[in-house]
Image (cartoon, helix red, strand yellow):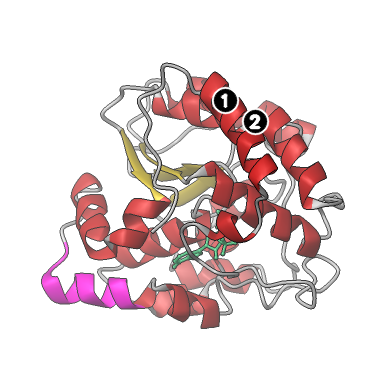
Amino acid sequence: MARLDVMESFQDIAFPGHLHTQETLRDAPNFRFQDTDTLIATYPKSGTTWMQEILTLTLNQGDDTVSRTVPNWARAPWLEQYYFPHVVKMMREPRIITTHLPYHLLAPALRDSKVKVIYVARNPKDIAVSFYHFHKMANFLPEPGSFDQFLDCFLEGTVSYGSWFEHVKGWTTQTSKSIFYITYEEMWLDLRGSLERISAFLQCPLGAEQISNAQKHCSFNRMKENPMVNYSTVSSDIMDHSKGQFMRKGKIGDWRNMFTEEQNRRFEEVFSSKMVGSHLKFIWEA
Ligand code: A3P
């Protein structure tokens, strides 16, 4: 079945919401990956959609037909969403699957599997800002209140998908050769080099022209205009575009425009206590 058929089979279904259910969380550890699958794992707002686009273009040798015609949630569905079992049946190999789940929940499914995993991390100050704006437009998420209130919840881990600190530590302390780590900031600073590294990891070599095409199609400006990834086609009941855009700024260091000195101090305090002993280094501004 061609990838485009996935879209045709889902014409009647509006954007299928965004939240996992108890049932899907229960099923996730039992999912049977295929050896040719690639799993994108991220904490929300880390560059998930960007990686979905990068992988779509990489696996299609830089050709943007699929990325222009199939929405990201159908070509790289979230494992934990209720519509996943229906979509996955219609996907052809090699499949791209996405998850925001923490490592420990997926460990049983990953064990004994040859699935390749790409974990994208992003500096958490920019994530907090991006997530806050997303809460304002996404009607399936609770009202975030003020940024100050939201930041407290983010630091406490009482937001959707839980603690950023636990998520990042859970995934990045795995030493499996099947897990490839990259940051949003690395992709932002050197997209071409990142595409080369990702295609090498996937054993999907691309020629110079194919890389150039992929690079062009997954630029922020191109993606911002692409209705298959900018969520402009979803109903305003689900995402209210009058309150913000999904493809918002796409920058490193936007937190500087939002954080007060006091918030930054509070953030640094929690960051240094939670990340003690971690080898991870983040790029906070460009
Ligand atoms: P901002 O809100 O800071 O702009 P996710 O897909 O994990 O929800 O992440 C969304 C964030 O990634 C948003 O960040 C969005 O603008 C950014 N993003 C998406 N595509 C991008 C691209 N091609 N280049 C840079 N940033 C991108």
Q: Residues within 10 Å of mark 2 (few under 14, many from 20)?
A: some
Location of mark 1 (residue): 166
Q: Which mark is residue 42?
A: none
In the image, residue 262 sits, relative to residue 238, either above or below, namely above
Q: Is residue 204 left or right of residue 155?
A: left
Quadrant into which the C terminus falls: bottom left
Location of mark 2 (residue): 163
Residue found at the very far front of the displayed protein: 261
Q: Magenta residues, as a range?
A: 206-216
Residue 97 horizontal/vertical position (percent): 49, 48
Q: Nearer the viewer, residue 86 or 167?
A: 167
**Which amino acid type is marked by label 1?**
Glu
Quadrant into which the N terminus falls: bottom left
Q: Residues within 10 Å of mark 1 (few under 14, many from 20)?
A: some
Prevailing SS of the magenta stretch: helix
Does the stretch in magenta take in 200? no
The image quadrant of residue 176 is top left
The image quadrant of residue 139 is bottom right
Q: Residue at x 37, y 21 (%)?
A: 112
Q: Secondary structure at mark 1?
A: helix
Does the stretch in magenta take in 215? yes
- Disc tally is 2
Q: Is residue 92 left or right of residue 131?
A: left
Residue found at the very far top of the displayed protein: 277
